[in-house]
Amino acid sequence: MASVEKYNRVLTIGLDTEGLNLMTSELANVSMYHVDTDDKFEALLEDESEENFIPLIFCGPKLNQFSPYEVAQTIRNTYPQSRIIFILGTTEDLKISTLKKNGASEVFILPNDKSLLNMEFDDVVKLIGSAPGLTRYRAVQLFDIEPEDELPFDLSVFLPMNNKYIKVVKSGDKVRRQQIDKFKEKQVGRVFIDSRQTDQFYDYCAEKLADLNDPNSAMSETERKQKLQTSVRDLFATIHDGSDNADFEVGRQVMKQSESVVAKFLEKKTGISFHKQIEAALGSTEDSYTHASSVSAIASLLSMATEIGKPEDLALAGLFHDVALLGFKHDPYPGDEFVESLEADERKKYLDHPMDAQRVLKTKKMTITPEIVKIIEQHHERNDGKGFPQALSAAKIIPEAQLLSIADQIEYYGQFRPGEQRLSPLQAIDAIEKNGSISLEVLFKVRKVLKSESNISTRD
Amino acid sequence: MFNSETQILIVDDMLTMRKLVKKACKTLGFNNFIEAVDGQDAYQKLQEAPIPVQLIISDWNMPNCSGLDFLKRVRADGRYKELPFVLLTAEAEMHQVKAAVEAGVSNYVIKPFTPDGLRQKLEQTYVKHAGANAA
Ligand SMILES: [Fe+2]
Ligand SMILES: [Fe+2]
Ligand SMILES: [Mg+2]
């Protein structure tokens, strides 16, 4: 019987040429077992050593007899604990959500998702151990760096002329004023860290964020608030529209950074583990997992910068806002058409989901405060009174719920959707203003955070 | 309990899923299987089976005739009113289980499943049907 040692812990199934080339070049020193024929696939399923754990399985569209759906479902059943990643050239007529429903943990479409896939490879390196000479870089957004700050990670910049990364600050070194000015000259988000140091980097950022949120910090109140706004703005400035592919990729990496930083911030401040909470509430349904964690991070950051609500409340409300919609295709602003298209019980489930969150969480033995319950209950209410489930009038909708709705919509508009333009956060705010769902007062505060001198890059 | 001779009808549109269900059933000691690719095919095979089917394990999501449609046809047929019918469903489709319960499903198994999980569900199913027959 084929044993798991043979797979060397990375297994590929039916990758196409592009996926295979990418894996073998990016993970040059990791040995893999390739299942590239129908026969090998069937043999794999017969394998009696399935008890063994294979952490990562990369799958593609290239088996003859077996569709990616079938691969996803059977591999998920055979390896329930594994991370199952699909690399596809196009979605063709495949639906990503269906693929995930069938068991895929993550689906990457090349070439758009190349940088996200690279982050996945980072994890392979972390898990399996990096081969010498193989450094992987991740774009990050720096915020609130001061002269004489000691960095617990290496910082590199990319020199396109030489096609090379250059280390400019070594871990443990102090940053000089001159260097900070240099970074600021660079486009935001064009600073890189070694992917093996991401944890140190996130810790550092979370520490900074906690400090900026601490009313007792050494800074003056005005300085503290100003800095907090600038930091949040910098993060969002990088979550850019897809006009330029490189920008788009950087934006996605920074979005991930924001999520990790907010998660650590929350843990620090409340002792609540973001990841454990989300796991417990949403299980492994990755589709809702991704949506929830992005909405949570955006809502929490906006709360910090606008001073609407408590960041930790918004973070938790973001995590759980759609918990009653598990496994349900969901657009935050679907219009009547979408609601009409649903069958009666699906429609009921959809219209009830804001009110149902608390009950669903209870079945999972989780509780949330009444404040958070209220934010969630109102996240589909609208300023024009046409929201659901209560069709509240503008004055009755709390600002926190509006902030959550904005985060929900920013996330929604920022997604790739076939035939539709992907919107940057600022463009999303324009769209939200047009759709009339949020009060002008709250929109104004959010717009002020997102739009600023930073866009004309004269920021100090 | 069901025994090694129990005739099991396995319904799934995916060849490899049928194999996995069969493999799990074999570990539990079962030997006799009939396979079908969708509800329509399954209903046909159910009627034509040389030895009567004693247990159905059916996928939910199938083209042409879904697990639910198949279940409804089975329950509408007087001969199969009491036939143990176990539905295989994904976690994400859990909200559809209600419809299945209303249509008279005996039990359901969530994918991904383990042989042991399957065994538990089959035991429950057996007890349930034995109880109903005794009453
Ligand atoms: Fe929602
Ligand atoms: Fe949502
Ligand atoms: Mg199926």
Image: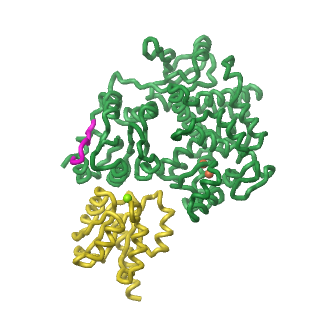
Chain colours: A green, B yellow
Left or right: A290 as drawn, with respect to B50: right
Closer-to-camera residue (A254/A220): A254
Tell me what residue is drawn at x 57 percent, y 34 percent. Answer: A258
Tell me what residue is drawn at x 70 percent, y 34 percent. Answer: A305
Give how far across and how far down residue A85 sits, in percent: 39, 42
Residue lying farthest right?
A: A395
Left or right: B119 as drawn, with respect to A120: left
Q: How many marks?
A: 0
Give how far across and how far down residue B12 sits, in percent: 33, 62
In the image, residue A392 sits, relative to residue A32, either above or below, namely: below
Tell me what residue is drawn at x 58 percent, y 65 percent. Answer: A344
User: Magenta stretch?
Assistant: A32-39
- The question of residue B20 being in magenta is answered with no
Give how far across and how far down residue A247 sits, in percent: 54, 26
Tell me what residue is drawn at x 23 percent, y 41 percent. Answer: A6
Quadrant hosting residue B107: bottom left
